[in-house]
Amino acid sequence: MKKRRIVVKIGSSSLTDRADGLSAELVSEHTAAIAALAQAGQEVVLVSSGAVAAGFRNLGYHSKPASVVSKQAAAAVGQGLLMEAYTEEFKKHGIITAQLLLTRQDLVNKDRFHNTGRMLEELLKRRAVPIINENDSISVEGITFGDNDMLSALVAGLIHADHLIILTDVNGIYDGNPHNEPEARKYTYIAEVHDGLLKAASGPGSSVGTGGMKSKVLAARIAGSLGVQVFIGTGNGPEKLLDIVEGRGDGTYIGSTSRLSGKDSKRWMAFCSVPSGTLTVDDGAARALSAKGTSLLPVGITGVSGTFRTGDVANVVDPQGNLVGRGQVNYPSDVIEEIIGRTGDEAMKISGGTTPEVIHCNRWIHLQKEEAVR
C-alpha cells in the first residue's frame, strides 16, 4: 500500500452506547482499525470527540448536560478518561499515543499554528498516533471551532494530509434524509462541494454530537480546498479504515481541488486567521483580485472598516459586500483611509511607505464566503 498521511475524525455518536456514555467496545473497534492503518505503514492522526460523553456521569448528571458550563465540567473530567481508554487500547497494538488539546486561538496565532504543525510532524516521524480534541473546558464561545468536523479539516490541511476520513452514524451524503425518506439516494462520489449541496445538507442528526451533516459537508469543502481527499461515512471491524482508503468504504468520497496545497502561510491566513477589519474595493479591483490574483493597490479601494495594524489580516469585499478574499495588509487602517483612491506612487509619498501595494499578491488568498472560517 502506498504510504499516505491520514486524519481520522470520530464523532461522539460513533463512540457512545445507547445511554450516551462512552462505549469501550466502540473505542476498541476504532483503535484496532487505526492500528491496522499504522501497521500498514500509514501515518495517522486521530481527531476524536467524546470527552463530554465519557465524563458526564462521573459528575452525577443522568443525561448529557445542556448548559455550556456543565458541558465544560463534564469535558474536564471526561478528557482524561477518553485518553486513558485510547491509550490502553493502542498499547495492545504496540502504538504510542500523544494528546493534543486545541483551542481556536492556538491556530489563530500564526506562530502557534506553525509550531503545532512542526510538533505533529515530529510525532508522526516517531510513529506515534496524535489524538486531538478541542479543549472544550476552556474554549470561549465565539472563538471555538464549532465542532470537531471543522477542527479535523484544519488539522488535515495543517499537516498536508492525503485523506480525511470522517466517521459518522450515517453512511454518506444523501439527496434527502434517509431516516424518513426511503427513496433518498446516496452520493458515492462528489467531485467537489458546491453551494447547492452545502445548502441542502441536513441539520444535526444526533442528540449526542455537536455537528450534523452540514458541518461535515462544510468541513469537506474546506479540506478539499486544502488539497485533501475526504470520505464521510461509516464502517465496521478492524479493516474498515483500510477499506475506506482503498476506495471500498460505505459512504461518500469527495475529491479535492488542491488550490492551497503546499502554501502554509495561505492555509493559515485563509482558514485560521481572524480578520481585524474589512476593505471595500471597486468592481475592477474585485475582478482582478478574483481572476488574476493581483496585488491590491490603493486606487481600487473605496472604503475601510475596523482598526488594524501593518501585518494584520483584513477581509476584502466587493461593492455589494460579497467576500472576495483576505490578505495581510502593508499599512495600518488609518493610513489606508488617507490613501484611498490614490496611485501607488502617490500613496507612498503620502504615507512615507516603501511599497505601493496595500496587499501584496503573495499575501493574498481568494475565498468564497463559505470557505472563510471565522
Image: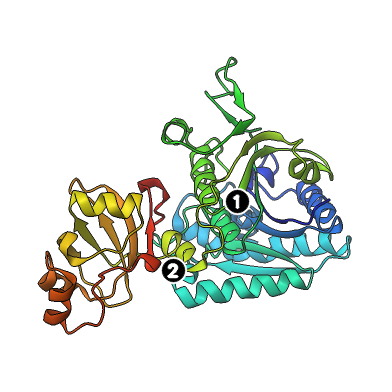
Q: What residue type is labelled 2?
A: Val
Q: Residue at x 63, y 53 (%)?
A: 50
Between 75 and 288, the residue placed more toward the observer is: 288
> Extreme top residue here?
183
Separation of residues labelled 2 and 1 (CA atoms): 21 Å
Foreground of the two, 122 or 293: 293
Q: Mark 1 points at which residue?
A: 228
Q: Which residue is drawn at 23% across and 55% down?
A: 285
Q: In this view, does 233 lie above or below 274?
A: above
Residue at image location 64% in from the left, 75% down from the top: 119
Q: How crowded is mark 2: few (under 14 residues within 10 Å), some or many (20 or more)?
A: some
Q: Where is residue 45 in the image (x, y as percent from the top left)?
A: 69, 60
Q: Disc 1 marks which amino acid? A: Val
Residue furthest toward the front? Answer: 345
Front residue of 242/206: it is 242
Horizontal relation, residue 112 to residue 285: left or right: right
Out of 298 and 11, give the one closest to the viewer.
Answer: 298
The answer to whether residue 165 is seen in the rendering is yes
Residue 65 visible in the current orientation: no
**Secondary structure under the numbered disc 1 in the rendered image:** loop
Residue in view at x 40 percent, y 67 percent: 362
Contact? badges 2 and 1 (CB < 8 Å): no
| Residue for badge 2 | 108
Choose top left, top right, bottom left or bottom right for residue 185.
top right
**x, y (%) of residue 350?**
11, 80
Q: Tell me which corner region of the image, top left, top right, bottom left or bottom right, holds residue 122.
A: bottom right
- Estimate the x, y position of residue 125 in percent, counting from the top left: 75, 72
Across and down, in percent, residue 129 comes to: 74, 64
